[in-house]
Image (cartoon, helix red, strand yellow):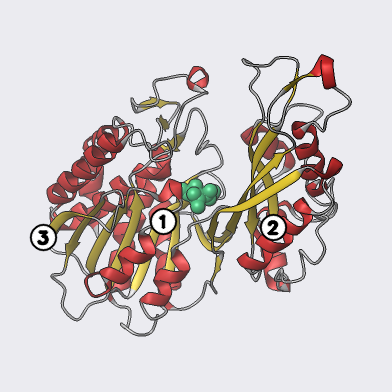
Amino acid sequence: MQQQLDWLKKNDAELIAQLARLVAIPSISTDGAHQKEIQQVAELTCEQMNAAGLHNVSILKSGDSNPYSYGEWLGAPGKPTVFLYAHHDVQPVAGFEHKWLSDPWTLTERDGRLYGRGAADDKGAITVQLGAIASYLKTVGSLPVNVKMLVEGEEEVGSRNLAGFFKEHKQKLQSDVIVVCDTENIETGRPSITYSLRGIVALHIEVVSGEKPVHSGLAGGMLADAALALNVLLSRLYWKNGKIPIPGFYKKVRKLTPKERRAFRKLPGNDKTWRRDFGVLPGVKFATKKGLHPYEQTWRWPSITVIAQEASSIKNASNQVLPRAEAIVSCRIVPDQDPDKVYKQLAKTLSADPPWGVKVNIKPAGCVSWWMTDPEGPAFEAALAALQAGYGVPPVAIGCGGSIGFVGPLSELFGGAPALLLGIEDPRTNAHAPNESLDAGDFRKLTASLAHLFHNLATLNRDSG
Ligand code: BES
Ligand code: MN
């Protein structure tokens, strides 16, 4: 391993420069307006895959998907095949540009952190994976395992073509172990393996009360205000510091085992650091249910967020009774909630007995499954040992409140292959927000850990998952 680790040290500046080139391309997938940049970043990813020594590098597509970058190295016959996943698309910066302390598209180092949109979510993962691969191919000339690396271009919009893509290319992609680098470490410098993800059920709600806006001086007080009616409906979701008041909503929520409960309590994190990391204003309270551990609340309990609301805009405001108002309600779901059931429960709560008899139209706005595994077995052992070696700190098993929809289906497609979710983000990352960043130390430590992981997985019996 020494040669590989030395190579990583020697090539540190070059790896950061590679990441900077990825970050420089605004490959935003959420607005449909950056297809050129997404193509560019997919091509650059391929170029970097080639440079790292991967073979059969190409851009793949499925239907009208954004381009996937793919590369492989299959020179270890009889050894396990490791499927590596990352994504090259990023979140937008629009609306909050002024909050950035440096240009979002110029990777900038400040106080040991690398700032830039996508630095952590998830371009850093591309560099980390390629760094670990190159550390072998550029020194000993071979990897101890086979590698198939896929970098997606539409993760931030729900990976809508990924399931089809996997089915289409099942043979080509078939692997023994899945390694996803798109989650977080529980604290900077503390390596974490994620063993549960929440899912998402989103819906679009529209309230219509009339054919047109009407002067509020003529009819205010007489006509049903669609904006107010919508908010009356949304207020039915308000949970104060308790449970979301939807009948039967928690019936299927899987309980923590006593072992998990003990483990959660031992994990780092406290109100002070959460307030700082999440930017909570003084005097504003947390919404956590009384007595519930914050990790249980955010990893293993469902939650509801109104992620958009429109009636009129402040800019166009005038004295009118508005005839239409809309919102998107996004619900994080957990093991063992059924997405269809949750959708129905939400729709029923939001459409029953609307104020003034306004029309309520509800339609689905996307759905992603939750995922949970038992973090045990030889693949997890290999990962824990690799993280210990790479970080020099004992790793922890954690949950995640976010969603990565394909993990479950892909693991199934590969016949129950274990999925190792290793972090590249940390509590200060600000993913999806201004001043996204990556801890430079963790970037190096994860790269070294992956190099160790390849070594450790080589001895894994191919069907002992
Ligand atoms: N990297 C995140 C997932 C994540 C969230 C990891 C929070 C760690 C903490 C991923 O890129 C993401 O944002 N996923 C989306 C999925 C959605 C678009 C279906 C999410 O969770 O909102
Ligand atoms: Mn991500």
Of tags 2 and 3, the one toward the viewer is 2
Up/down of 336 relative to 361, above or below = below
Up/down of 341 relative to 37, above or below = below
Residue at screen point 18% across, 45% down: 48
Label 2 belongs to which residue?
302
Report if residue 417 is visible in the image. no
Mark 2 CB lies closer than 8 A to ligand 1:
no
The answer to whether 120 appears left or right of 326 in the picture is left
Q: Earlier in the sequence, mark 1 or mark 2?
A: 1
Label 1 belongs to which residue?
160
Report if residue 39 is visible in the image. yes
Category of crowding for the residue at label 2, using alpha-carbon neighbours closer than 10 angstroms: few (below 14), some (14–19), many (at least 20): many
Q: Amino acid at mark 2?
A: Pro
- Front residue (pair 426, 444): 426
- Front residue (pair 162, 184): 162
Of tags 1 and 2, the one toward the viewer is 1
Q: Amino acid at mark 3?
A: Gly
Residue at screen point 14% across, 55% down: 57
Q: Earlier in the sequence, mark 1 or mark 3?
A: 3
